[in-house]
């Protein structure tokens, strides 16, 4: 596996955005599959000692996603969201602002914009976490956004390269 790390500061839109980018030695269609197929999501989505124990996806604008992560003590953390934009193998946008269809969530946290750009036979993978407030972005960073998403991205790259 060959990846190149890149971290952008959390200031592009007033301190509400966190960005992680990597050049991954895998085709973008495989990375897209890893983000959209439940059987693949559970293999890479969370950094150890956490694990993903369940995933459901309805990959279309307005379609819902449901992912359940489990901590080392057995605590489950469900995450519901809705896809806002889907451009196969190129772009995936989803948010936790809605839980299904267009039903608002109790406390929206962020919208994720994923891009998969072909670059010299590899994929430039960029994950942008856009938060409702600078405080939410700071909390996400404190939770370990760059470290956690970085580990998960390494796992994503390894899985995609093996498909």
Image: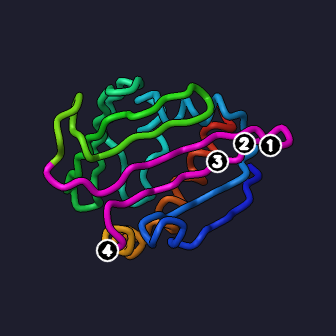
Coordinates of residue 59 in the picture (x, y in percent): 41, 25
Residues under labels 3 and 1: Cα distance?
A: 10 Å
Residues under labels 1 and 2: Cα distance?
A: 6 Å
Labelled disc at residue 99: none
Horizontal side of 45 relative to 82 (left or right) equals right
Provide the residue span drawn in magenta. 106-134
What is the secondary structure assignment of the residue under circle 2?
Answer: strand
Q: Which residue is mark 2?
A: 123
Coordinates of residue 36 in the picture (x, y in percent): 47, 30
- CB contact under 8 Å: marks 3 and 1: no
N-terminal of the pair, mark 4 or mark 1, is 1
Coordinates of residue 74 in the picture (x, y in percent): 21, 55
Residues under labels 3 and 2: Cα distance?
A: 6 Å
Residues under labels 2 and 4: Cα distance?
A: 31 Å
Q: Which residue is mark 1?
A: 119
Q: Which residue is mark 4?
A: 135
Horizontal side of 104 relative to 110 (left or right) equals left
**In the image, is residue 37 above or below residue 46?**
above
- CB contact under 8 Å: marks 4 and 3: no
- CB contact under 8 Å: marks 1 and 2: yes
- CB contact under 8 Å: marks 3 and 2: yes
**Does the stretch in magenta take in 107?**
yes
N-terminal of the pair, mark 2 or mark 4, is 2
């Amino acid at each position: 596996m060959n990846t190149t790390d890149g971290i952008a500061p959390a200031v592009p839109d007033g301190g509400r955005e966190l960005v992680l980018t990597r050049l991954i030695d895998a085709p973008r269609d495989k990375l897209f599959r890893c983000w959209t197929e439940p059987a693949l999501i559970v293999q890479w989505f969370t950094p150890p000692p956490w694990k993903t124990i369940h995933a459901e996806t309805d990959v279309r604008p307005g379609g819902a996603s449901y992912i359940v992560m489990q901590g080392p003590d057995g605590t489950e953390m469900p995450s519901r969201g809705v896809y806002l934009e889907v451009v196969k193998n190129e772009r995936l946008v989803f948010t936790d602002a809605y839980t299904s269809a267009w039903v608002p969530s109790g406390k929206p946290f962020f919208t994720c914009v994923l891009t998969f750009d072909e670059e010299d036979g590899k994929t430039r993978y960029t994950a942008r976490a856009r938060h409702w407030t600078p405080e939410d972005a700071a909390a996400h960073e404190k939770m370990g956004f760059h470290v956690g998403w970085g580990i998960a991205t390494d796992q994503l790259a390894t899985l995609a390269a093996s498909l």
